[in-house]
Structures are given as structure tokens and as C-alpha cells.
Amino acid sequence: TRDAELATRVRRLRNHGMEPRYYHQEVGGNFRLDAIQTALLRIKLEHLESYHAGRARHAQAYQKELAGIEGLILPQEGAGKRHVWNQFTVKVGDGRRDDLRKHLQAAGIGSEIYYPLTLDHQPCFKDVGRGRETIRVAHELAQSVLSLPVFPEMTDAEREEVVAAV
């Protein structure tokens, strides 16, 4: 970046929010990269747009192929927005999310439940916030969403196998 203020903040965030050392100005993390990670990311960065395009192609196909399945709510791309489809997360109704996940697993198809616990249930945030009643939707989603495979190198046959299993 050419923005000195932003560069300073990013450096601070990548080092646990410290500045100066052992004085934490904000919550950060250990986001420092070693030389090998940096070299690999420089190469991968050249392919970023093709990665986006590959996932978007599969997401669009999922939208058509999974449309109309009762109890399944598909993610939507906002009008005038560009989704990178890092995940393709569906909402499964009637408390059947875990059944679908087990079915997919039995068929050899990976899926993931990202963030199964809301922040108020994470031990590190137990004393933060006002409790369950203030984030009802988050709790509902933590119990009902499932991410299906979507990656740039995915073949049409692999995607069709996921669709058939769903």
C-alpha cells in the first residue's frame, strides 16, 4: 500500500495488535508470513481471478441445479455485487442439516460446518455481549447451515455428484 497509516495498522494487526512491543492497541493476531508462504502467495496471486471465476462457475451451476429442493435455501449474490464464493453455504431446514452432512459423508463428499458456535459461546468471549437473545439469527444459522464443496479445480462431474447426493 502507499497509505502509510494503513501500512502501520496492518503491521500492528499482524503482530497481535502490539505497538510498541507488549502494548496492544487493538485485537490482532499472528498473521506474519514466512518467506516460503510469501513466495507461494506471490505465485498464487497471479491466478486469483481464475480461482474466482472457477468457483463462480460452480456456484452458478449449483444455483440452477439445486433450485427448488424443499427445505434448502441457497445463498444469493447481491445485485451489483461480486461474490468470490469462497464457500457455498446452504441453509437446511427442518433440523436436517446434520442428516444431510452424514449422508454426504457416507457418499464420500466433503462438507463443512463453519463456525458451529456463535461468538457468545466461545470461551474467549464469554464475558462479552448481552447474550443469546440478542443474536437469535446467528444461533439459528449456527445450527442450520452447511457449506458444500466449491473450488476452482472442481470438475463438473464432481459437482454433479454433490447435487445428486443433496
Image (tube, rainbow, N blue to C red):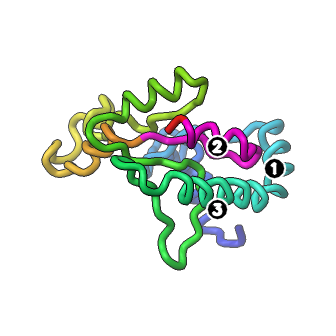
Q: Secondary structure at mark 3?
A: helix
- Residue at image point 30% right, 37% down: 143
- Residue 147 in the image: state x and y as whole percent: 50, 42
- Residue at image point 44% right, 48% down: 90
Which amino acid type corresponds to the residue marked 3 in the rendered image?
Ala
Q: Secondary structure at mark 1?
A: helix
Q: Is residue 77 magenta?
A: no
- Between 48 and 107, the one lying in front of the other is 107
* 16 sits to left or right of 48: left
The tag on residue 7 is 3
**Residues under labels 3 and 2: Cα distance?**
44 Å
- Figure quadrant of the N terminus: bottom right
**Residues under labels 2 and 1: Cα distance?**
27 Å
- Residue at image point 36% right, 35% down: 97
Which amino acid type corresponds to the residue marked 2 in the rendered image?
Glu
- Residue at image point 39% right, 42% down: 145
Q: Nearer the viewer, mark 3 or mark 2?
A: 2
Please report the bounds of the magenta region as a residue range. Answer: 146-164
Q: Earlier in the sequence, mark 1 or mark 3?
A: 3
- Between 101 and 85, the one lying in front of the other is 101
